[in-house]
Amino acid sequence: MRSTMSRLLPLVTILLSLSCSQVGAHAASASFLYAKAETKRKYGSGYGFGGDARGGESGETIEVFTKEELARALCNRVKDGYCLDAAPRNVILQDEVDFTTDDGIVTEPGCDNDAVKHPECTVIKRHILNRYDSCRGRPMVQVAYSHAGVAPLLVGSNKTLRGGGTIVGSGLLFRGVSNVFVSGIFIDAINPRVAFAGAAFTVDNSTRVFIDNCTVRETGIFVRTRGRQNAFTVSNSLFYGADEYIPSCGDYHFFLWLVDSYHDRVTFYKNRVVNALGSGFSTSTPSSAIIHLICNTFVNSSMEAMVYAQGDATVLAEGNSFRATHRAGLPFGGAVYMPRVPPDSKRCKPLIDRICLLNEISEAQCGTDGCRTNEEVLQTFKMLDRSFLAAF
C-alpha cells in the first residue's frame, strides 16, 4: 500500500494566522503552497455557513485502521442510499485505506480529452465522461474507471472525522445530514485519469458541514454539491492539481469546486489551489446560491481560477490571491462583488459593517467584465446573520 508521504508533496508547517495580504505575499513560495496546516480547530469555533458544526463532540471516540472499520464508524445504518446513523461519534483515522479496487471497473461513454485539438492526448488515454455535454465535437469512446470513485463513503449526522490518515480511491458523501466536522484528512487518487468520475467531498442536501485542514489531490472534482440546499464551509485546505495523469495535455487539474444545487450557502476560506485547468469554482446550473470566497490562493491556473455563477447566484470574492493564472473569472451571469481597488473595498462598510478585503489580481486577469463589483451582492450579505462574517 502506498504511503501518504510518497504520494503527496513534501509538506511543511505554516501559521494560518496570516492576514490575506501576507498570504498573497507568500503565495509564490513552494514551501507555502505545498504546506499542510497543523492548526487544530475547536468544535463549533469555525466560521462561515458551516461554522457552527460541532460534529461528534459529545459522542464516543473510535480509532479505525481498515476500510471496513472506517465505513462502519462513519455510518453503521443505511437505507435507500441515506445514512440513518445519527449517533454522535469521533472517528480517528491515522493510516491509509485504499478503496480503488473494491467495486470493480465500470465503463460508460466519454471521450479522449482534447482529442480534436491535441491528438497526442489520446496516447496517454486521459478521458472525460460525457457529463454536461463535455464531449461535444469529440470522438466518443467507452471509458473505463474504478466504480469506487463514484460510490463515496456515507457520513452520518453528528460525526467528526480527523487524524491525518489518507483515503485513496473514494471520497466522502454528506447526504441529508447535519453537523459534520472533517479535519486533517488526505483524499487521494480518485480516478485521476478520468474527469467527472468522482469527487473528494460531495454535499447533498446537508447543512452545518465543516471541512478544515484537509489535503486533496488526483481527483476529478474536489468539492461537489447536489440536491436543493446545502450550507457548509471548506477552509485551510490544500487542493493540488498537478499530476502525471490529469485529464488534460498539461500538468494541471480539471475541475475544483462544482456547485450543482440550487440554494447553496457556501464559504471557501483560506484554501490553497495549485495547478487548476478549467474551473476553480463553478455553478453548473441556474441557482440562487450564495458563495463567499475569502482569502483563497490560486496558483498556476491555465484557464480561469473562478467561473461565475449562472442564474441568480451571488458571489462575494474578497482577499483572494491569483498568481500565475490566466483569468480570475468569467462574466457568466449572477451577481459578483470582487473588490480590486480601495474605493470598492470601502463600499462594503455601510452594508456588512466592515471593509472588504482586496483581491490580489491584475487588470489583465480580469479580462472583459471578469472582476465585477455588483452592489446587490453586498445587499444580499447585509441580510445574512452576521455570524457568517464575524470571524473575518
Image: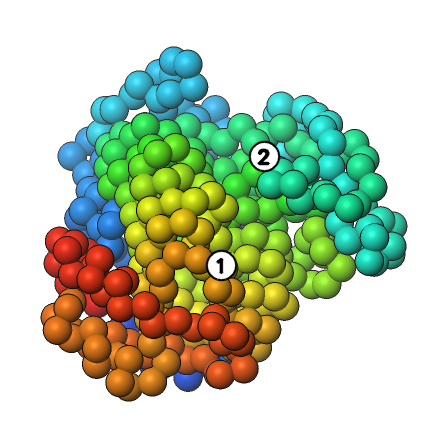
Left of 135 or right of it: where is 39?
left
The residue that disc 1 covers is: 332
**Looking at the image, which is closer to me, 345 or 78?**
345
Quarter of the image for the C terminus: give it: bottom left
Q: Report x, y in % for residue 68.
A: 48, 24
Q: Mark 1 or mark 2: which comes first in sequence?
A: 2
**Looking at the image, which is closer to me, 382 or 295?**
382
Amino acid, disc 2? Gly
Please identify the quarter of the rendering in which residue 274 is found: bottom right
The residue that disc 2 covers is: 149
**Looking at the image, which is closer to me, 316 or 85?**
316
Query: Which residue appears farthest toward the bottom when viewing the image?
Result: 342
The correct choice, above or below, for 388 with respect to 331 in the image is above
Image colouring:
rainbow
Left of 162 or right of it: where is 216?
right
Residue 288 seen by the camera: yes
